[in-house]
Image (spheres, coloured by chain):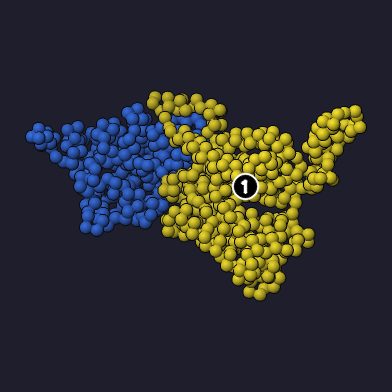
Chain colours: A yellow, B blue
Amino acid sequence: MADSSESDRLQKETGFQKLIRRPEIGAFIVMVIIIVALAIASDMKAFNALGLKNNIKIISQYGIIAIGAALLMIAGEFDLSIGSMIGFAGMSMALMLKWGLPFGLGEATPFTAFFITLIMTLSIGYIIGTIVVRSGLSSFIVTLGFLFFLRGVTEVAFRLINQSTQVSGLPDYKEESWFANILGGEVFGWFYDAWYWIGTKVSSGIDMNADMSRAERIELIEYLGLLNINRRMEQWVTGFDARFMWFIVIAVVAYFILSRTQIGNWIYATGDNKEAARANGVPVNRVKIGLFMCTAFCATMFAACQVFDTNTSDAAKGNLMELFAIAIAVVGGTLMTGGFGSVLGVVFGAITVGLVANAVFFIPAIDGAWFRVFLGAILLAAVFANERIRKRITGGI
Amino acid sequence: MAEPYLKVSGLVKRFGPFTALGGVDLEVYPGEVHALLGDNGAGKSTLIKTLAGVHQPTEGQIYIEGKPVQFRSPRDASGAGIGTVYQDLALNQLMSVTRNFFMGRELKGPLGTLRMDEMNQIAHDEMLKIGIDFSDPTQAVGTMSGGQRQTLAIARAIYFGAKVLILDEPTSALGQKQQMGVLKTIKKVRARGDIAIIFITHNEIHSRLVGDRFTFLALGKVIGAGKAEDISDKEMRRLMSGGAEMGDLEQELSAI
């Protein structure tokens, strides 16, 4: 009865044990703590109409690239070229918009600038992936090479074509082009409309002229601010940045692919034990190359949202973003050695890191550099926590 | 006498100047356990890797159901119904039982989605058929015991069409109880009657417990073969030690 008794022992795993074995659980707890702490420390300012918009902007930026980085990490590889890829893509789009398409093909529209850039970045992603799988070299060193290479190409191209490492004063394309608008414009205006409508309804029940002290009056006004009824006054907020929508789209698609499809199973298999995956017929190399192209795509989306939002670009855009992306993936429960991780966890990680990065704007008393202290600390904590989870899973009986 | 499913005749494998296999003959019948025994370096690994399509034979011929075949890759061999369960089992510890069971051969629905419920059910049923009732196939393989992992790898090979199941030292590196579990699994697969099993082992007792037929290898050659009832325990011990007489060994040892 040796085997049946063993399965009996396994059956005792409770729902709670399953929950704490999930990759995103640590990231979720940290995120809740940060949200509560920030709400208290900023006196709810971080989550009023404008605060929410600004927080979600940076969360979405981090989230877009972190999801790409996390999928690649689950398959057991790194991409250090994400930041330089953002700079490269931004340069490519801005220069085309300002100086026209290459080879004298005429004026660029936001649509053509974006797609030509995307073809280039996906090709670079393909080349990086091919070099990694063909050479068998560590992706760390190959993508470190591309970190320098792409940043250098970006600067050189700026100087050669533009005589300056900055493009500014581009026309506001999102006014005319629907395509620029879905990348750089605003989305989900109904959210703020609804908030405003509820706030107006609630506040109409409050009598401002009632007899109250000055302190009570200030408190009431702050409360009304949270209700967003003053959006026509100091906080004119009509919607979120379009990158929020792209963050949601990329997160949902990545979640679907990773958790529900055959490709997702291949990604996990590739990162866990490459040889075992190969022995069972998983196309390991194609999975890896595809994921290097995926990080290139995420970097391009990051850059496109930035270019069409601000109508500027410069050679330093995306600097250090590869490290943030990897850090957020790890904080989100992705295992450095591959084979384990979840998109949901990365979303939690992006929310956590984004909120802390922005905290200085809502709590003026703190030094902005504390952000990096915090990031370093939770990164280390996350690595240890992930390692514990891995041991718990592979511990066996 | 039934036709052997797999037949090997005069198999020679040389790696440069080194002769790993020097003319091996082997016949494997459905519904039988063929124990392949021999010391380290006897050529067991080379033989099974040749059968699994990893190596190509230098000379000699492999027959499947009487027809000569050539395996250029492991894929050819598994296509011909040869399922090899290596010692490392080709399992991913962090992934669930089901995800491992169907790794690389997932059941797909629309948009490449996994038919997860169906796959869970099949993984559970297939493992139950050969002996373990693993109630929760969504658990990670890392939580399974060594014996259960063997069962998973064997069930997977059978489900995906193995007619010859090659088990590479499935009982080594396991505790006593788990070894018995694996032997029970082997017996259950044998009882199906349609699968031939090649059972590679160092262990005389284990091969005695489940083996129908024995082949002893030493230095790349078959030094003895036969049905279980035709080989005495004493003969078996002699062949296991590479053909040397037990008495000789005892003398050598006592002389030290």
Lateral position of residue A270 relative to residue A66, left or right: left
Q: Which residue is drawn at 43% across and 37% down?
A: B152
Using the image as rendered, state which of residue A200 and residue A377 is in the foreground: A377
Whole-percent x, y for residue B104 in the image: 48, 47
Q: Residue at x 76, y 42 (%)?
A: A49
Q: Residue at x 43, y 56 (%)?
A: A137
Whole-percent x, y for residue A102 in the image: 64, 71
Q: Name the residue under label 1.
A: A63
Whole-percent x, y for residue B111 in the image: 61, 49
Q: Quadrant of the C terminus of chain A?
A: top left
Whole-percent x, y for residue A25 in the image: 57, 35
In this view, the residue farthest toward the left is B255
Whether residue A55 can be seen here: yes
Q: Residue at x 84, y 45 (%)?
A: A233
Lateral position of residue B182 relative to residue B123, left or right: left
Whether residue B126 can be seen here: no
